[in-house]
Amino acid sequence: MTPKRTLASITAALLAAATLASCAQSQRDDEGGGGADDGTFVFGAAGAPEMFDPFYATDGETFRVTRQMFEGLVGIKPGTAEVVPELATEWTPNDDGTEWTFKLRDDVTFHDGEPFNADAVCYNFDRMFDQNEAGQTAGEYWGYVMGSFKNDAANSLYQGCEATDDYEAVITISGPTSGFPTMLSLEALSMQSPKALEEGDANGIAAEGEGFSFPAYADAPVGTGPFTFGEYDEANGTITLERNDDYWGEPAKVSELVFRVIPDESTRRQELEAGSINGYDLPNPVDWAGLEDDGNSVEVRDPFNILYLGLNPEANPQLKDLKVRQALYHALNREQLVQTQLPEGAAVATQFMPDTVGGYNTELEPYAYDPEEAKKLLAEAGAEGMTLNFAYPTEVSRP
C-alpha cells in the first residue's frame, strides 16, 4: 500500500468541524462479538486512515487509529483541557520560558524493543524539524505550532533538543509562549521509535501529483502505546491492532482491536444491530433514543468543537470589504441553524473556542440576525447580487 493524500482534502478538512460527537456501543454479549478480556473489539470507523505516521496525519480517522499506538510527552486529561503527564512525568521552564526540562519515564520501551529515553526524544524532535519540501507541507501541525522547519530555523519556535541525562531532555524554544508545552499533546507530535523511523526512511515523503506518496515506515509504525500495529487489509477496509503486553501503563482489556471502515452511518448502525461490530461513532442524533431502546450504550461527549464558515477573499475579492463580511454575519440565522440542524447541546458560537477552554470571553455577543441590515450593508459596499461558492467535505461523516 502507498497511501496518498490530496492537497484539496487537507483544505476541506480544515473548513469544517463538528459541534457534538457521540458513540454507540453494544451492551450485548453476542457470540463472537468480542469486548471481553483477551477477546476482540470491533469498531465501525467512518472513514479509512490515510496512513499510519501521525506526524503527517491531518484527519481524525488516521488519528483514531494512531492514538492507540502512540503517545506524546504530555497528554490531555479526558473531558478537559488540562495538560497531564504522559511519557514525561514533569516539566520545568527556565526563568525566561525558553528552555524546558522534561523528566521522562524510565520504564518505557517502543514496540520494537528499543528504549524510550532522552536520546529518542531528541531524535524525534530533530526528525520532525528536518523535513523536505513535501514533508513541510504534509507535516502541517508542526508548521502550525512551531512556525517553520530547519530550512528556516530563524523563524521556528523550536530551536533544539539536548539529552542532558538518560531520562532528562531539554527542549529550547525561541521565546516564551502560553502554547508550550500544551502543543506537545498533539497526536502529530507523538514519540516514535528512532530505529524504525530510520530503517523505514520515515522522512522519505514525496510530492505526487496533487498529493503525496509516503515511505515504507508509514505502513509499519512503531510507538509506545497500549496497542501495536498488526495489519491493514485495505481491500476489506480493516485495520487490526494487537495488545502491547509490555505496555508501561494499564494494559488494554482486549487482545485485539479491529477498525472496520464503514462510511455510511446507517450501515454502521445496521452492523451494530447485527452484532458484527461492537461500537461506532457519529450516530445520527435522531437515532440516539432508538439505539438506547435497543440495549446499546450511547455516550455523548460535551461540545468541544466550533462549526464555522471560512471565507476566502483571494477567490472572491468582495470578501475583503468589512461591510460584506458583516452583511454575511447578519444574514445567517444562527439560532435557527442550532435549533433545526445541530444536536442537542449545541449553542450559537461567539468565538473560536468553546466555553470549556481557559480564556473564553463571556462578554462577547453574536451579531443579531437582521436580513434588512445585511441588504443595507451589501448595498453600501456595492456588492448587491454577489455570488458565493461553498465547499464542504463529502468523504467523511459529520454529526
Image (cartoon, rainbow, N blue to C red):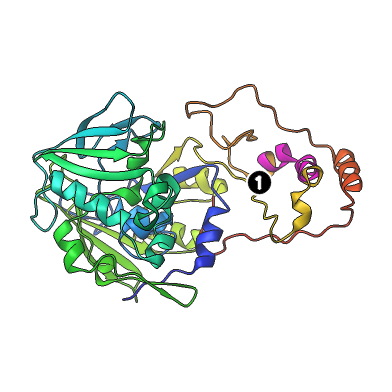
Q: Is 295 in front, or is 311?
A: 311
Q: Is 67 in front, or is 273?
A: 67
> Does 54 appear in magenta?
no
Q: Is residue 232 left or right of residue 345?
A: left
Q: Is residue 200 left or right of residue 63?
A: left
Neighbor class of circle 1 (other Cα within 10 Å; few <14, some 14-19, many 20+) is: few
Above or below: residue 200 compared with residue 194: below
Residue 15 in percent (x, y) is at 58, 53
Could you tell me what secondary structure mostly forms the magenta stretch? helix
Which residue, given by chain and number where applicable, does mark 1 sit on?
Answer: 341
- Magenta span of residues: 325-338
Q: Is 99 in front, or is 109?
A: 99
Amino acid type of the residue tagged 1 in the rendering:
Gln
Looking at the rendered structure, the number of numbered marks drawn on it comes to: 1
> Does 335 appear in magenta?
yes
Residue at position x 88%, y 57% in the image: 385
Whether residue 154 is visible, yes or no, is yes
Q: Quadrant of residue 366?
A: top right
Query: In the image as oriented, which residue stretches furthest toward the front?
Result: 154
Residue 384 in percent (x, y) is at 89, 53
Residue at position x 70%, y 55% in the image: 313
Residue at position x 84%, y 57% in the image: 386
